[in-house]
Image (cartoon, rainbow, N blue to C red):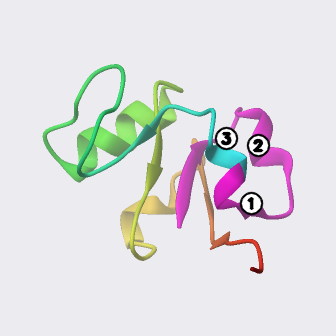
Amino acid sequence: MAVLPAAHPLAARASLRTGDLRDENVHLRRGPSTGPEPASLTELLQLVALGQKLALVRAMLPTLGATTSIVFPLTTPAT
């Protein structure tokens, strides 16, 4: 699942593919990321709502129902 701020241009789409996020500041649990590093899921979701990061999460959590963020299932291109 991808979590985006509601005002992000990609949030207007009906669906997202992993490639759509290639040029975005996506928080990765491991590996490089730019900007502030969250210490918890709550902090990560706050950074998303503020438009500072996008996030990838394994499953939709009850706390992701905020109106400041949009949650998308991700699809990968067929190979």
Q: Mark 1 vs mark 3: which is more N-terminal?
A: 3
**SS type, badge 1:** strand
Question: Residue 30, position in %: x, y?
Answer: 23, 50
CB contact under 8 Å: marks 2 and 3:
no
Find residue 26 and name its label: none
What distance separates the C-alpha of mark 2 from that of mark 3?
A: 9 Å
What residue type is disc 3 on? Ala
Label 3 environment density (alpha carbons within 10 Å; few <14, some 14–19, many ≥20):
some
Question: Residue 24, position in %: x, y?
Answer: 59, 33
Question: Residue 38, position in %: x, y?
Answer: 21, 35
What residue type is disc 1 on? Leu
What distance separates the C-alpha of mark 1 from that of mark 2?
A: 8 Å
Label 2 environment density (alpha carbons within 10 Å; few <14, some 14–19, many ≥20):
some
Tell which of 37 and 31 is nearer to you: 31
* Residue at x-position 49% and y-position 35%: 49
What residue type is disc 2 on? Leu
Could you say which quadrant of the image residue 44 lies in? top left
Find residue 16 and name its label: 1
Indicate whether 55 appears above or below 71: above
Q: For the magenta stretch, what is the residue range? A: 1-19
Q: Residue under circle 3? A: 6
* Residue at x-position 50% and y-position 31%: 25
Tell which of 74 and 23 is nearer to you: 23
**SS type, badge 3:** loop
Q: Residue under circle 2? A: 10
Task: Check if residue 30 falls in the magenta segment.
Answer: no
What distance separates the C-alpha of mark 1 from that of mark 3?
A: 14 Å
